[in-house]
């Protein structure tokens, strides 16, 4: 077992190190400083190994910290303070314990950890013919170990902030492990009885529906002040730990690890390979087959106009739907003002301080990624094989043409939302500074333009797709992740609308200018099909 653990960690670390080194080679400026034989440089491999260890520690503990903070700690504190308290306002510590117990059971149903496979499992079991039982158990015990350590650290730290008893907090991670052990026995017992996995659509839907229902009940009952008493929760936790220990026999004596593991791994890898092809086929199906579609323009303008006309369905359908939904929401808010005038003050205050929230909203609504994906699959993957398509003049000209098109696609929802926010501000009591109306409108439109420029610029500078439309750029993924993180953090920011709006408008203009320079300078080298 120890040998299997060592080999599994070695394969996982090697795969991650090679991914990091490959990602370094994709950074436009950094790759010029790196040697050609990158994978043979000991210093860089040590550096990548250190990064790999940091990533592993963060994945083991970071997720647990976020889970406890967002799913257990904050709801227990905030909901308890604002509870309607049908049975009395619940104590935050008791609410913390109640939510944790319910969500832990929900988590075991959604993901019991057993056969939660990765690429390194495929390499070990299918390609290297390793002992499937040992691979499965090593992987399972390692996840349980991370769960216990993470829950112990953050459960005790956050629970003590709410006044929970230390001895109860110490029980919590072992209860979570016990429930995972119980959950792991169900697929094993099902396979022994039926000779197949529980892969029906009904089972899959229930594994999503039941946890979501339990989550809703946990928060809903906490808000109503109806929670399970503390000692009953403790009894449930003790029972979970004991039943988990009894489940060890089934897990250790299961005799079909190899059969079920090979089935899952082969299916998983085939899905990963085929998903990109299916996505490509789905994107191509929305192209208009009308052969009468043509254009009176010439050159790159002709190429772009044909693309836009034949992809009108994929480009404009979502934009039109978002616009209609935005109009409906604005209308509902105005109607609510008529029936509940007491909410006007809160809405007005929110509009004057929470404009950064719209950054995340506009991020979610922007169609930039869909536009660039369609560009590659249905146009660029063919034209990138021709030298004329990659000259600086052609790239910059087509970039400007495409940028205008994507801005037009994203503009209707932005205009409606911006105008709607200004109208809501006026109807909720207005503002002493009339410029705020214009700032609200222009800043929302500016956010939309920024994301349009951002997605197209990153596409040209990093072009992440292979010929099969598989994303193969680590830097592209990092930038997309950072973009999401920054926009999400905007939810927590409260700044005056006037100054934040001015900053958004100025940054959007500056970003547009810089993007033009970067695309002209670097895109002739970076805008290519990845291998």
Image (cartoon, helix red, strand yellow):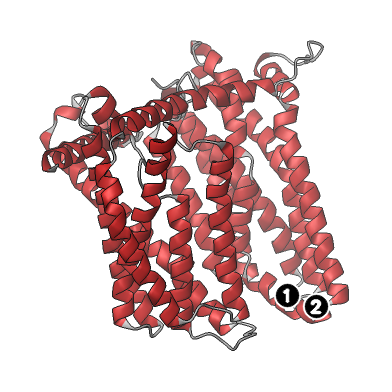
Distance from Cα at disc 2 to Cα at disc 1: 7 Å
The residue wearing badge 2 is: 429
Q: Earlier in the sequence, mark 2 or mark 1?
A: 1
Residue 50, position as x, y percentages in the image? 19, 47
Q: Residue at x 68, y 77 (%)?
A: 349
Give the farthest residue toward the bottom.
88
Residue 39 vertical placement versus 476 (above, below): above
Which residue is at the front of the view, 17 or 438? 17
Residue 84 vertical placement versus 111 (above, below): below
Q: Residues within 10 Å of mark 1 (few under 14, many from 20)?
A: some
Q: Quadrant of the C terminus?
A: top left
Report the side of 337 relative to 374 (left or right): right
Residue 443, position as x, y percentages in the image? 66, 57
Q: Residue at x 63, y 72 (%)?
A: 353
- Element at label 1: helix
Residue 207 vertical placement versus 232 (above, below): above
Q: Quadrant of the N terminus?
A: top left
Q: Give yes or no for contact between labels 2 and 1 (Cβ–Cβ under 8 Å).
A: yes
**Which of the labelled discs sits on residue 348, or is there none?**
1
Q: Residue at x 77, y 47 (%)?
A: 323
Dividing the picture into quarters, in which one does residue 350 lie? Answer: bottom right
Dividing the picture into quarters, in which one does residue 121 lie? Answer: top left
Examine the rendering and report whether any part of residue 412 can be seen: no
Give the farthest residue toward the front.
193
Residue 36, position as x, y percentages in the image? 21, 24
Which residue is at the front of the view, 172 or 223? 172
Which residue is at the front of the view, 110 or 22? 110
Examine the rendering and report whether any part of residue 244 can be seen: yes
Q: Residue at x 58, y 56 (%)?
A: 360
Residue 385, position as x, y percentages in the image? 49, 12
């Amino acid at each position: 077992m120890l040998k299997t653990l060592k080999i599994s960690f070695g394969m996982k670390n090697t795969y991650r190190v090679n991914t990091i080194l490959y990602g370094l080679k994709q950074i436009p400026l950094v790759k010029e400083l790196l040697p050609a034989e990158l994978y043979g440089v000991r210093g860089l491999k040590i550096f990548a190994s250190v990064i790999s260890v940091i990533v592993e520690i963060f994945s083991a503990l970071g997720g647990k910290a976020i889970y406890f903070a967002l799913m257990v700690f904050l709801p227990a504190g905030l909901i308890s303070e604002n509870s309607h308290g049908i049975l009395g306002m619940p104590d935050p510590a008791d609410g913390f314990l109640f939510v944790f117990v319910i969500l832990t059971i929900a988590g075991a149903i959604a993901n019991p950890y057993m056969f939660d496979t990765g690429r390194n499992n495929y390499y070990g079991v299918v390609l290297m013919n390793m002992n499937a039982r040992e691979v499965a158990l090593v992987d399972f015990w390692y996840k349980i170990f991370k769960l216990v350590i993470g829950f112990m650290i953050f459960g005790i730290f956050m629970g003590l902030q709410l006044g929970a008893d230390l001895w109860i907090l110490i029980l919590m991670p072992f209860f979570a492990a016990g429930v995972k052990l119980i959950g792991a026995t169900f697929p094993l017992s099902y396979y022994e009885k039926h000779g197949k996995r529980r892969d029906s659509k009904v089972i899959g839907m229930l594994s999503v529906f039941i946890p979501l229902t339990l989550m809703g009940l946990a928060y809903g009952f906490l808000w109503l002040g109806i929670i399970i008493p503390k000692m009953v929760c403790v009894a449930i936790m003790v029972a979970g730990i004991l039943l988990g220990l009894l489940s060890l026999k089934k897990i250790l004596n299961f005799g079909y690890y190899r059969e079920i593991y090979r089935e899952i791994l082969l299916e998983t890898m085939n899905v990963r390979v085929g998903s990109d092809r299916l996505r490509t086929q789905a994107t191509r199906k929305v192209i208009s087959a009308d052969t009468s579609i043509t254009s009176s323009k010439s050159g790159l303008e002709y190429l772009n106009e044909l693309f836009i006309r034949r992809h009108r369905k994929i480009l404009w359908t979502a934009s039109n739907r978002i616009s209609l939904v935005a109009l409906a929401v604005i209308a509902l808010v105005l109607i609510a003002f008529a029936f509940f005038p007491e909410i006007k003050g809160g809405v007005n205050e929110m509009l004057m301080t929470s404009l950064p929230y719209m950054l995340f909203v506009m991020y979610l609504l922007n169609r930039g990624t869909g536009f660039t994906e369609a560009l590659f699959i249905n146009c660029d993957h063919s034209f990138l094989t021709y030298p004329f398509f990659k000259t600086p003049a052609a790239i910059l000209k087509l970039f400007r043409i495409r940028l205008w098109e994507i801005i037009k696609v994203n503009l209707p929802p932005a205009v409606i939302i911006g105008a709607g926010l200004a109208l809501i501000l006026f109807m909720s009591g207005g503002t002493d500074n009339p410029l705020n109306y214009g700032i609200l409108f222009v800043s929302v439109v500016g956010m939309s333009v920024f994301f349009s420029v951002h997605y197209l610029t990153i596409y040209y500078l990093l072009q992440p797709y292979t010929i099969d439309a598989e994303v193969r750029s680590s830097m592209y993924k990092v930038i997309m992740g950072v973009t999401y993180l920054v926009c999400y953090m905007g939810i927590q920011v409260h700044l005056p609308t006037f100054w934040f709006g001015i900053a958004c408008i100025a940054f959007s203009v500056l970003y547009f200018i810089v993007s033009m320079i970067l695309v002209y300078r670097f895109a002739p080298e970076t805008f290519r099909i990845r291998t």
